[in-house]
Image (tube, rainbow, N blue to C red):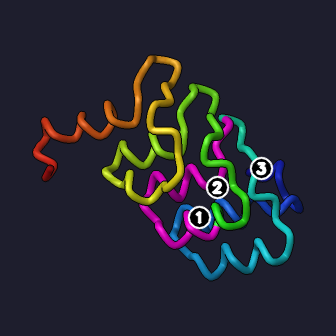
Amino acid sequence: WGRCAGCGFSALRLASVTGHARVVKALIEAGVDVHALDSEGWTALMFASLHGHAGVVKALISAGADVQAVDSTGMTALMMASINGHACVVNGADVQAVDSEGWTALMFASALIAPGADV
């Protein structure tokens, strides 16, 4: 992320991962690029979704973050949210999208049932 010094995404990523919605909103107001990608093709929305930070997800989507964006393996923010049981945070995502292995968000979410997730 050091390569990104000055582009604003480093701060956006940190705020998204840690769930600081007010910081994310301030960065958006300052003109940060909500579409910026890391080396794996991850966006701030993907990081926030993976960690279940609904306030950050809402702020990013309101600012135009692409809910259909895919990373280098074809995963979407919804799939990443589903991995940790946070699928409800990503409204408007394509629930039928598949990653490079053919997995959908539902498949990721259903994988949580075996270890005892509440349904």
Tell me the residue at 59%/64% (across/down): 16
Using residue 3 as the reference point, say whether residue 118 is left or right of it.
Answer: left
| Position of residue 31 in the picture relative to residue 19 (left or right) | right
Badge 1 local density, few (<14 within 10 Å), some, or many (20+)?
many
The residues colored magenta run: 41-59
Q: Residues within 10 Å of mark 2 (few under 14, many from 20)?
A: many
Q: Residue 16 bears which disc, if any? A: 1
Q: Quadrant of residue 27?
A: bottom right
Identify the image quadrant of residue 74.
top right
Q: Is residue 22 magenta?
A: no
Q: For the point 54% across and 39% down, which residue is it? A: 76
In front here: 19 or 98?
A: 98
In this rendering, is residue 98 above or below 89?
above
Looking at the rendered structure, the secondary structure element under dot 1 is: helix
Label located before the other in sequence (1 or 3): 1
Q: CA distance from mark 1 to mark 3?
A: 13 Å
User: Residue 69 at what x, y percent from top left?
Assistant: 65, 40
Of the residues shown, which amino acid type is indicated by label 2? Ala
Q: Position of residue 52 (x, y in %)?
A: 42, 60
* Residue type at tag 3: Ala
